[in-house]
Image (cartoon, coloured by chain):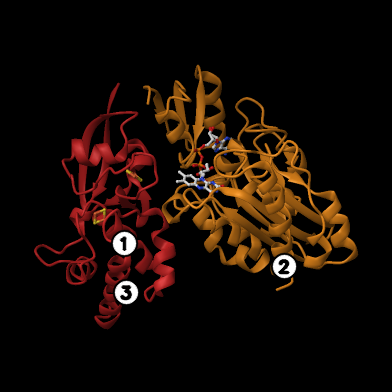
Amino acid sequence: MTITATMTVNGEERSGVCEERTLLVTFLRETLRLTGTHVGCDTSQCGACVVLIDGDSVKSCTVLALQADGRDIQTIEGVADGDELHPIQQAFHENHGLQCGYCTPGMIMSALDLLKHNADPTEREIREHLEGNLCRCTGYHNIVKSIRAAAGKMAGAGA
Amino acid sequence: MYAFRYHRPDTLDAAARLFGECEDPRYLSGGHTLLPTMKLRLAAPTDLIDIAHIEALKGVRVEDGAVVVGAGARHADVARSPGCGAAIPALAELAGMIGDFQVRNRGTIGGSIANADPAADYPAALVGLGATVTTDRRAVPADGFFPDLFETALEEGELVTAVAFPKPRRAAYMKFPNPASRYAIVGVFVADTGAGMRVAVTGAGPCVFRVREMEEALTRDFSPDAVAGIAIPEDGLNSDIHAAADYRAHLVTVMAKRAVAKALG
Ligand SMILES: Cc1cc2nc3c(=O)[nH]c(=O)nc-3n(C[C@H](O)[C@H](O)[C@H](O)COP(=O)(O)OP(=O)(O)OC[C@H]3O[C@@H](n4cnc5c(N)ncnc54)[C@H](O)[C@@H]3O)c2cc1C
Ligand code: FES
Ligand code: FES
């Protein structure tokens, strides 16, 4: 059966028709056409689909669109300020934190949640935090470096 | 996933009433076990009753020497709760070891114990601390809550509302995690409680169990050496691609030793 889901996505109220069984990631990608959020595994392992619900990072392949009804969602499309990249995005760019880029949206959403709770994480804390985000290209090293660099920059900017 | 109807009640009464009215309903909490199971078509309920919006199920509080965790409290809520961290740090640490950061932002204690996965972490804390499970019908002691593999004392439609963990004198949890999922290959919760010594093991068998011989040894001498020589039989333990039964039996002793050392600080 079709049903309407309504949520705030990247600061704007968005509605779309879906089924009860539609996953949040499918709703974002196929109904709202926000294809920055990726599907890597569809089994809650890889973290390519991470978005923020009310500020908390979650795997949107394991959340129903209807569970997110009425909530505040942030996706990778809502991270930059117009043409100006977010410091985390800029740091991934500067530190070669991506190769194919498939895992990157999830990595950045996950990093946003980490820096919210811990503005100055150690390398070890970053690695532990990324437990649920898999990357098949970079070997993680430059991802960790990017997040460290972003943390430094955000602290410097008083953000 | 097969099609289903979705409901979002605000109260316990409304949830229970809906459960009674639907053909083959399931409660939906964090969905981090149920939705993957439905994707695999291992479950195909006609109706999902989303209990995540029921206020009465939320929160972690400290009351009369016990930490009371609402069934809807997420693993992240327990891991970060200052009250739980101060009263029973081993419980907050256990919650912080479940799955990964995103799993902890969705999964709840009610869903974890109602599901009773043999490799789940919370059952070790419930049995290890002698907790009491409260439902919308009654109170059930943790010792009788997990009778067998994926089985609980819950009746059809019975809803877990909270779990009360009495504060121990000292306690610790040690787990040997599966490197991919972080589920426990073996996890051991050791607690020196007001009501005696408790050693609870998860991951090793079909469901959580206590090791009386270790409890007696720790009553005499609370030290890692007291349990170091106690081997548990491998009969009836789990054997799968992750670990054979004899390896799990060995890990029980190793994790118990480490948990005692940790509890001693
Ligand atoms: C990638 C991944 C890694 C994980 N790693 C671990 C791990 O290391 N350790 C671990 O312990 N767990 C792990 N889990 C499981 C996770 O903790 C689950 O979230 C948890 O087991 C189920 O909680 P839930 O709130 O998501 O329940 P749901 O999936 O919503 O529900 C599970 C079952 O419980 C029932 N239920 C839910 N709430 C109640 C209630 N209040 N009363 C009665 N019945 C109820 C539902 O009807 C359903 O049958 C992992 C999960 C994933 C996806
Ligand atoms: S697609 Fe969601 S975790 Fe992999
Ligand atoms: S950059 Fe290719 S998967 Fe991470």
Q: Are marks 1 and 2 in contact (CB under 8 Å)?
A: no
The circle drawn on residue A139 is: 1
Q: Which residue is mark 3?
A: A148
> What residue is shown at x 50% (from left), y 53% (from top)?
B179
Amino acid marked by disc 1: Gly
For marks 3 and 1 on the same chain, the one whose residue lies earlier in the sequence: 1
* Alpha carbon separation for disc pair 1 and 2: 36 Å
Number of numbered discs: 3
Along the line of sight, the residue nearer the viewer: A97 or B228: B228
Name the outermost residue toward the bottom: A156
Task: Tell me, by letter, which chain the rendering colours orange.
Answer: B
Do marks 1 and 2 share a subunit? no
Q: Which residue is mark 2?
A: B263
Left or right: where does residue B95 sit relative to residue A113? right
In the image, A5: left or right of B213? left
Residue shown at the point (30%, 47%) measured from the top left: A49
Residue B116: % across, % down:
62, 38
Q: Say whether residue B193 is visible.
A: no
Bin the neighbour count of mark 2 within 10 Å (Cα to Cα): few under 14, some 14-19, many 20 and up: many
Residue type, numbered disc 3: Arg
Residue B24 location (% of width, % of height): 51, 19
Q: Are marks 2 and 3 on the same chain?
A: no
Q: Where is residue B231? Give x, y as percent.
A: 79, 52
- Residue at mark 2: chain: B
Label 3 – label 1 distance at C-alpha: 16 Å
Please identify which colour was used for chain A in the image.
Answer: red
